Amino acid sequence: MNWKLFPCLLLNLLLCPAHSNILVIGSANADTFLPIARLPTEGENLTLLPGKHPQIDLPGGKGCTQAVAVSKLTDKSCKFVGQLGMDDAGSVLIKALQDAGVDTEGCRRHRHLPTGRGYVFLTESGSVSAVVSGGSNIEGWSEWTEDSKEPISQEEIDSLLEGVTCIMLQREVPEYVNLLIASRAKQKGGITVIQDVGGEDRPISDEMLQHCDYLMPNESELHRLAASFPDPSATADNYISCARLLQKRGAKNVLVTRGSKGSTLVMEDGALIYQPAIAVSAVDVIDETGAGDCYRAAFAVALLEGQSLQACMKFASAAGACSVQVNGAVPSTPTRDEVDYCVTKGKQTKRVLVVPRGGYKNDDFPFLIGSRLNSMKDRPELWAHSLENPRDYVKRQVTIPGLTCVDFNYPQHFHSWSNKEAKAALDEAGLVAGAVCLRYPSKFARGAMNHPDVDLRKEAIELTKEAARTAIDLGCSEVVVWSAYDGYDYPFTVDYDEKWQQLVDAFQEICDAFPGIKFSLEYKPTDENTRFFTVPSTAAALLLVQDIDRPNMGLTLDVGHMLMSGENPGQSIAMVGKRKKLFGVQLNDGYTRLAAEDGMMFGSVHPSMALEIMYQLYRSDFDGHFYFDTFPQRSDPVAEAVYNIEQVKRFWNAATSISVDKLAGITGEHDAIGSLKMVDEALRK
């Protein structure tokens, strides 16, 4: 036994009973944080932000951070094995681990090697970049190599694995270390191996992939890993394809973390599980360092607790959301109470909000906001530049303070540029895609997915699948389907049961083809193209979703459409929200004369109704984004969008201020006067 490497290890094992232990093997760094306005360009010297000072020797490193996070999230034993220098930085790290309750008996201190260090550039928006000096993290594992004078023995590895049910590995240590411990764990059986792909950017062997139960890259790491394979045919154009490529080489379950866009688990059996990110307001995002490590640690903890995979991912997302609100890696690891509270009280969104362009300072509004792209064509005399194509429309939307996402119509908005070019334009503008909204061309005038011609029905289904591929390319996860043609004009024109079943069959095929995409039906009761729609109301749309019976099938509710149906939008939202099928909402208002779709500004005609819409969205834990489907033919479209954004935030703040107890008293008595007074009071706030 190499007692020099593992002092007191056997004594520790005798004192710690074997029960659901997590073993973390990896790096430990002392991090220095440098607050700067932006990253320097080549050859440029920058000073720190005015009044800011560097933070020195904060505990970090992927292994150390994950171990501390695990220990703070569970009462089970957590062991950490790492290599540190016999210097002050090493002592700081050992103390941080021990203070968090982590067993450090397996760590080694080196007299002639420095402790690893990280130099972190922290920008005002909270984004981070770093330069890492590996030190003992890289050079301190000589005993783990076969050609060592005194190599680590199998007995020592087995002692280290005693009582362990989960191993967490990262790539800031040599690959042979991960391979040695993972291969022995698989030989012993009963141990889950989680491999974090973060750390050194290097290829991974097929042998290592085969030992991993859960491979956990972020999106950029996944793409680089997939591209590292020497076979030129082994390419992938989106993150799910990249994950499946790794699975062909031996990986089992691939959990891809996508930051503010959530996370997706690509399972060994081909199934997909998507988990949105937990909303964090722009003002609360302090530092993203360590958020991914907290996610992975929380996932491991929840997995060993026997939670469902979806619950594991939600718990992990909450841990990541808590982490970004504190500076540093180890200092930002949350407690169990903090994560549990975030799981039950936190709001989910498609991204962690950033401060929008134009100097606009966002508040704690927890949703992305988009506005009708085609409205940018209106009032061209107010715009000094070209308005000839969607690229120009996006440039005009960039000038809208508070607007954070763009919904594209497909295929109409993709005739003049590619998906890649559209994504690049969004990135340049500082915007993200909210959803891809399907608009079937006029060749489907007698119906799209329920056209009487079977070949055209198939073509409509394929077009919907193309929209899903476009959503993936743009980095969003929702396709909104509205057909102007799936209806009829006169009695006895169609077989109602047949048309209904055609829609059910079509959506089932589409949902099964893209399980990672949310397909959202936007119903409309009537239109100039068809007097009666196959799906004319919220209740009918819910029934259709029930018959389709797919987890990624839901509804987008348009306020104007609900008014045209003679519905109370608040009630419709409550009905769909209760069943967790409200994927999207399109906000506007209207006079509803002659069943017209007015597309008026939100809350301009029915303010009390707008307030209740916000309240029901809040009550149902709506986790989509807000989209303004309005028609500013006579107004400045930019000014109208700004007004809509101000209005929705005003109504949201008013709705979230309503006393639940007071409202319960009003609804319990069906008190109309009390409700009107409550509305007045809320809107005055």
Image (spheres, rainbow, N blue to C red):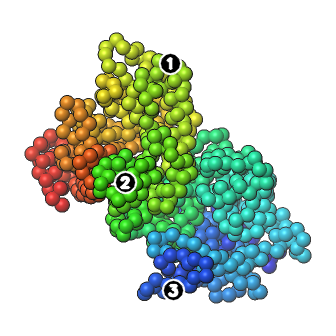
Q: CA distance from mark 2 to mark 3?
A: 35 Å
* Residue 58 shows in the view: no
Q: Which mark sits nearer the N-terminus, 3 or 1?
A: 3
Residue at x 59%, y 48% (from the top left corner): 265
Amino acid type, residue under disc 2 in the picture: Ile
Amino acid type, residue under disc 3 in the picture: Thr
Indicate the secondary structure of the residue bearing disc 1.
loop
Occupied quadrant, residue 290: bottom right
Question: In the image, 43: left or right of 395?
Answer: right
**Residue at the top extreme?**
492
Residue at x 38%, y 40% (from the top left corner): 556
Q: Which residue is mark 1?
A: 453
Residue at x 35%, y 44% (from the top left corner): 585
Q: Which mark is residue 47?
A: 3
Quadrant of the image for the C terminus?
bottom left
Quadrant of the image for the N terminus?
bottom right
* Residue 38 shows in the view: yes
Q: CA distance from mark 1 to mark 2?
A: 39 Å
x and y percentages locating residue 423 in the rendered image? 52, 53
Q: Which residue is mark 2?
A: 369
Residue at x 14%, y 56% (from the top left corner): 681
The answer to whether the residues at label 2 and label 3 have Cβ atoms under 8 Å apart is: no
Q: Which mark sits nearer the N-terminus, 1 or 2?
A: 2
x and y percentages locating residue 518 in the rendered image? 48, 41
**Residue at the left extreme?**
673
Amino acid type, residue under disc 1 in the picture: Asp
Q: Which mark is residue 145?
A: none
x and y percentages locating residue 497 in the rendered image? 41, 17
**Residue situated in front as seen by the camera: 357 or 570:** 357
